[in-house]
Amino acid sequence: MKDLSVIVPLYNEEKVFKTLLDRLLAAISNINFEVILIDDGSTDGTYNLILEASEKDKRIKGIIFSRNFGHQAAVSAGLDIADGELVLIIDGDLQDPPELIPEMIKKINTGYDVIYAVRKNRKENFLKRFAYSFFYKLMGKISKDIELPKDSGDFSLIRKKVVSAMKELGERNRYVRGIRAWVGFKQIAFPYERDRRFAGTSKFSFRKLIKLAYDGIFSFSYFPINFISFLGGFSFIVSIIGIFLVLYFRLFTDRNIPGFASLAIISLFLGGVQLLSIGVLGEYIKRIYDETKRRPNYIIKKTINNDK
């Protein structure tokens, strides 16, 4: 058994790979470690670089997916095979500095089960910073099951017993940082300065970020379905008030109420509420359907230096 397993999801990171591996190995050289590199369906030379690195150093393991399954699936695959007493999750773009690993190990050895890194400053563009800030504030308000720390990502150091607990949660739409918070144990934040991407372009498009946010909101909150219940109740109350006003003006005053505009507004409002309700219910039904199909979160085409 290793003292430390390092999980690194990779997708088209050939420009970063050599520097990433050099800095990572230098940071953990004094530890009994394994490095698990997950190729999430890369279309560049990432696979060949993983193969070359694993041939030189048997402590480097490779997991090659049959196609791109996404970042959260890649992290989950690493957790499934990690054999270390401590497990570190770190992105492969060098925005999370490997040099912080020894400090994180010192911190966790003071009596903690999870050290999760929290970004002190974001270097993304304004739109992304605003989107991240809005999401974490929203999750803080609507989530009753967990308290998701603001600006915490997947970069974290976790004890083996926590990893075992996380692996018991078998949902298909994975939100790893939410699962990490949900299982509990003694956790503490580790503030750090997040670097800019070392090379290449970000693989997290807005579409993927929205998907990740959806997984967080729908997996760890009942807010969407509670919201449409509130909206339905609100529209019902407004409708009752409108009925009484129409009756009052019709029976007790000579005031004429135009019909077309009122009907059009009411119809549009109720139609919007109904479509929103159908959309939210559809999202929950889609997730139920995903769970009942029991498809795996990922399919491995090849493993390298892995005896599990």
Image: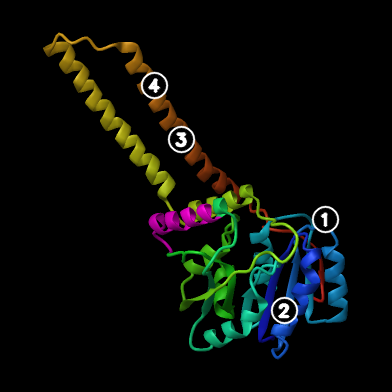
Name which of mark 2 and mark 4 comes first in the sequence: 2
Q: Position of residue 206 (x, y in %)?
A: 61, 49
Distance (Cα) linking label 2 and label 4: 60 Å
* Image quarter of the C terminus: bottom right
> Contact, CB < 8 Å: mark 2 with mark 4?
no
Residue located at (55% from left, 50% from top): 127
* Image quarter of the N terminus: bottom right
Numbered disc in front, either 3 or 1: 1
- Residue under label 1, please give it: 43
Q: Which residues are magenta?
A: 129-146
Distance (Cα) linking label 3 and label 2: 47 Å
Quarter residue 231 falls in: top left
Q: Which mark is residue 267?
A: 4
Residue located at (57% from left, 72% from top): 193
Q: Which mark is residue 105?
A: none
Numbered disc in front, either 3 or 2: 2
Amino acid carrying label 4: it is: Ser
* In the image, residue 166 above or below residue 227: below
Amino acid carrying label 3: it is: Leu
Amino acid carrying label 2: it is: Leu
Distance (Cα) linking label 3 and label 1: 38 Å
Distance (Cα) linking label 4 and label 3: 14 Å
Q: Which mark is residue 276?
A: 3
Name which of mark 3 and mark 2 comes first in the sequence: 2
Residue lying furthest left:
252
Amino acid carrying label 1: it is: Thr
- Residue under label 2, please give it: 24
Local secondary structure at mark 4: helix
Numbered disc in front, either 2 or 4: 2
Residue 71 visible, this angle: yes
